[in-house]
Image (cartoon, rainbow, N blue to C red):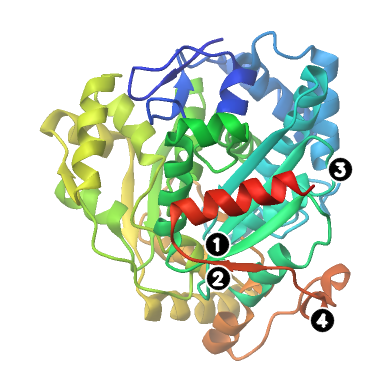
Amino acid sequence: MKYISTRGNAPELSFAEAMLTGLARDGGLYVPKSIPTLSQDEIAAMAGLPYEEIAFRVMKPFIGDCFTDEEFQGIIARAYEGFRHTARAPLVQMGPNHYLLELFHGPTLAFKDFAMQLIGQLFQFELERRKERVTIVGATSGDTGSAAIEAFRGLNNVDVFILFPDGRVSDIQRKQMTTPADKNVHALALEGDFDDCQARLKDMFNDFEFRDGVKLAGVNSINWARVLAQVVYYFSSALSLGAPNRKVSFTVPTGNFGDIFAGFIAKQMGLPIEKLVIATNQNDILHRTMETGACTKAGVTPSISPSMDIQVSSNFERALFFAYDKDGDAVTKLMEEFNEGSFTISQGAMEWLRDQFASGRASEEETKKTIRNEFAETGEVLCPHSAIGVKVANEQLSEVPMITLATAHPAKFPDAVEDAMGARPALPPHMGDMMEREERVCQVPNQLALLETLIKDRIAAR
């Protein structure tokens, strides 16, 4: 199994090499050279299996010979042993033909744990085998950072620096990043929004002297291993509702497009998915793009769903790569135009995208109304991101079962939930003292040179 860049001018890599590299040296994102498929019988044979066994069978074709079966099974087992639900990703019925996929039973109460716990174990295993150490720098709108710190804290072969937009994450998200005391993790509060954090991260990857000097690696959803881990719960949930003998649809609240792109991969592998629905908040660049064919930055407006406050959806580049029939030069041109503010998708590529994805949006008031109404009608307490998914899913319901991804525990956004429904969601007991824990955080300006100096100084001092 080989991996190629969406921009067509980087070396082909193995799975392990692509994982450790993160962003390709031509600025593109790695994708499989070909997508493995599973037969209907192979999919049906996974029904009723534990989540870890489904994960092994779904991901193994993408791994190649980088790990033996025994090694990879051990990695998966260690990744999910800290989850607090035996099903890992349980389904809850919301109404006729509508189900909620709870993805918040991991260590940091967010869907990012499914990928980050796995990638932490993959990194540790591979780096120990190579006798190497790397520096991970990540950008987060909230959940990726806490999941990365939780996954990599205390590991011997990794230093982790997480950039998050100062004042633009929830208090719980911030505390999860700033309270771990492990010396190998560092929380950096950047002046600006998430797109600024993501831009500085990409600048570091494109500064090859710095990149090579600190052995830079990335765990944002630009990293293919992150996307691959998320493919698994599309299979596990669809199997629970009768796949492959029954079609299913998914609605995915998304800002950076990684989670819904995982659904696209699942569909290409043979999972019978009827619809993949993009759900956006008021920062609705993905929905606007799907409606108009023009991808135009419009600035980020802070919202009660901060993990979706994004205008540069990095993983959309992967979808464009397939929409343009794997033409790396075409994708490079679009990304260069986007750096100037906007690009327009060709008619053929737009038809392909609309054939693969539907979309919708939810305003702030619609999000609050959904939280309030769903609690009254079903007793389910939704975080703002999950509520956006439910609102958009309700507009797309049909005779085909719809699964909406619940991406975070409501207690991660207590102020927004309390404002919407009048009751404050409590943290799970094991996290009850979170707000009293001491913080370790460094406020940093939005300047590449200063960030690189800070990172090099902290590595040197370890």
Front in this rendered view, residue 309 or 341: 341
Kindly identify the residue that appears in the image at 69 percent across and 63 percent down. 177
In the picture, the disc for residue 436 is 4
* Image location of residue 222, percent across then percent down: 49, 37
Front in this rendered view, residue 106 or 134: 134
Residue at image mark 1? 164
Instruction: Label 2: state its secondary structure.
Output: loop
Q: Residues within 10 Å of mark 2 (few under 14, many from 20)?
A: many
Tag 2–tag 1 contact (CB < 8 Å): yes
Kindly identify the residue that appears in the image at 62 percent across and 31 percent down. 215
Tag 4–tag 1 contact (CB < 8 Å): no
Looking at marks 2 and 1 on the same chain, the residue that comes earlier in the sequence is marked by: 1
Residue at image mark 3? 81
Q: Amino acid at mark 1?
A: Phe
Looking at marks 2 and 3 on the same chain, the residue that comes earlier in the sequence is marked by: 3
* Image location of residue 82, percent across then percent down: 85, 48
Query: Marks 4/1: CA distance?
Result: 21 Å
Query: Marks 4/2: CA distance?
Result: 18 Å
Residue at image mark 2? 169
Q: Amino acid at mark 3?
A: Glu
Instruction: Label 1: state its secondary structure.
Output: strand
Looking at marks 4 and 3 on the same chain, the residue that comes earlier in the sequence is marked by: 3
In the rendered view, would you say 392 is above or below 272?
below
Residue 92 falls in image quadrant:
bottom right
Looking at marks 4 and 2 on the same chain, the residue that comes earlier in the sequence is marked by: 2
